[in-house]
Amino acid sequence: MSQREAQAAASARTGRIRLGMVGGGRGAFIGAVHALAARMDNRFELIAGCLSSDPQRSRESCAVLPLRRDWRD
């Protein structure tokens, strides 16, 4: 089973919706609010994100969020 298939199976078992974010990285107010709301709701699992148009800033932003996927995946 691939990593992606294993992640999908884990999400199916928990009943949580897999979520990806575009934007909302370091310094973006509303993105942080959306990520926090998704965690508080507990029906979503933040698994991936492209949080900035600048690759380094995106990596730094991803490092502080509970993302399931690493930026290199």
Image (tube, rainbow, N blue to C red):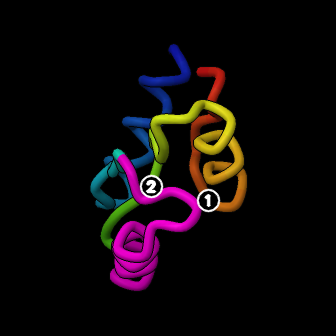
Query: Magenta region, mostly helix, strand or loop?
Result: helix
Residue 9 makes an appearance in the image: yes
Q: Which residue is mark 2?
A: 46
Seen in the image, is 32 located left or right of residue 41? right
Q: Quadrant of residue 28?
A: bottom left
Image: magenta residue range: 23-41
Q: Position of residue 30 (x, y in %)?
A: 35, 74
Label number found at residue 66? 1
Which residue type does callout 2 highlight? Answer: Leu
Q: Is mark 1 in CB contact (under 8 Å) with mark 2?
A: yes
Which residue type does callout 1 highlight? Answer: Pro
Q: Along the polypeptide, which appears first: circle 1 or circle 2?
A: 2
Q: CA distance from mark 1 to mark 2?
A: 7 Å
Seen in the image, is 70 located left or right of residue 33? right
Given residues 12 and 62, the one toward you in this image is 62
Residue furthest to the top in view is 1
